[in-house]
Image (spheres, grey):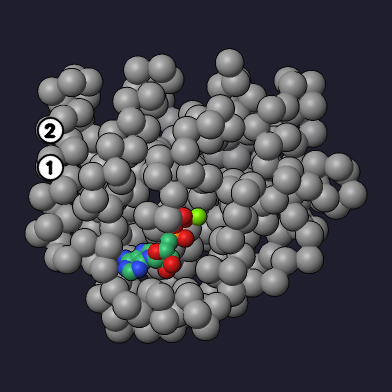
Amino acid sequence: MQKSVRTEVIGIASGKGGVGKTTVAVNLAISLSMMGHRVMLFDADLGLANSQIALGCACPYNLSHFMSGQKTLQEITVTSRHGVMLVPGASGVKELAALTRVQASRIVQAFSALEDDIDYLIVDMAAGISPSVLAFMGACQRRFIVVRDDPSSIADAYGTIKVLIQDYDLNEIYVIPNAVNSQADGQNLFRRINQVCAQFLNFTTHYLGSIENDDMILAAHKKYEPVMEFAPRSNSARDFKRLAKSVTQMAPIANFSGGMQFFVERLVRYQA
Ligand SMILES: Nc1ncnc2c1ncn2[C@@H]1O[C@H](COP(=O)(O)OP(=O)(O)O)[C@@H](O)[C@H]1O
Ligand SMILES: [Mg+2]
């Protein structure tokens, strides 16, 4: 059968923890799914592995069961009530980021078998810039850096962008201001960061929109529901819908080597 889909792989990182990576990953995934796209969320945060909580899903298995050969990728994947497929992370993530080429072939095959079904693969990263986070970011086609308007978040976002560019020679970097007071404030924050990148790294990042600070996100979290479901008319839900629309309108990548298969292949290649 002819393959029609080229999976877009988007990695979501921040440097600093607690700025909203998982919130953005989960609600962007749901918004894209609501638009009719087929979306998979990959939880690559092995420390906290909280995508499943934010998505409101119970996951009997996780990546460690797949890595040990006990379960197939299909068997560990759960589909949320919003139609988002979730690969639960946990301890298998570290192994996946440290595969040898030989070990990788089974995994590459497993991922490429899913390829026809998926338009967007969204990878929710751990905080920081550990070798495993950088390997995952390198394997993605586009990199979203979530940032809040506070000095340590900005410094960590800049530090992450700098490593991605200077040490990993990566492009397609997008800044997503989160928990801002208004779209104008978010755009301003983006401009400030982008200006520093242009001046000191000779590199420009992209902007797709901001997410406002919204108490509904916390209220939703307490109910184990994503805000898209808990408060679909809230300001943040509106912003996630706009962000999803911008994501679908991103300019195509030149020399696109698309999909799940290449994602895992690059993951192996990007290890130092
Ligand atoms: N736009 C926002 N407005 C209000 N609270 C937010 C917003 N984004 C995230 N939060 C809250 O901030 C906390 C950290 O978010 P989370 O997505 O888990 O961050 P990370 O994955 O980067 O560690 C959570 O309690 C979440 O509900
Ligand atoms: Mg998280």
Q: Which residue extends farthest right?
A: 70
Residue 51, picture quadrant: bottom right
| Mark 1 touches mark 2? (CB < 8 Å) | yes
For label 2, count other residues whose C-alpha is less than 10 Å away and answer few (under 14), some (14-19) or many (20+).
some
Q: In the image, residue 86 lies at what x, y percent?
A: 62, 60
267 in relation to 252, above or below: above
Query: What's under tag 1, amino acid-wise?
Result: Arg
How far across and down, in percent of the image, does residue 154 sit?
Answer: 26, 42
User: Which residue is found at the position 46% from the left and 67% from the top?
Assistant: 30
Question: What label does residue 178 carry, if any?
Answer: none
Residue 257 can be seen in this image: no
Quadrant of the snapshot with the N terminus: top right
Residue behind label 1 places its C-beta within 8 angstroms of ligand 1: no
Circle 2 — which element?
A: helix
Which label was assigned to residue 195?
2
Residue 85: % across, % down: 61, 62
Per the rendering, the mark at residue 191 is: 1
Task: From the viewer's perspective, tell me whether residue 213 is left or right of residue 186.
Answer: right
- Residue 77 sits above or below residue 158 on the image: below
Query: Would you call the spot at circle 1 few (<14 residues within 10 Å), some (14-19), or many (20 or more)?
Result: some
Quadrant (top left, top right, bottom left, bottom right) of the C terminus: top right
Q: Residue type at mark 2: give it.
A: Gln
At 60% from the left and 54% from the top, the residue drawn is: 48
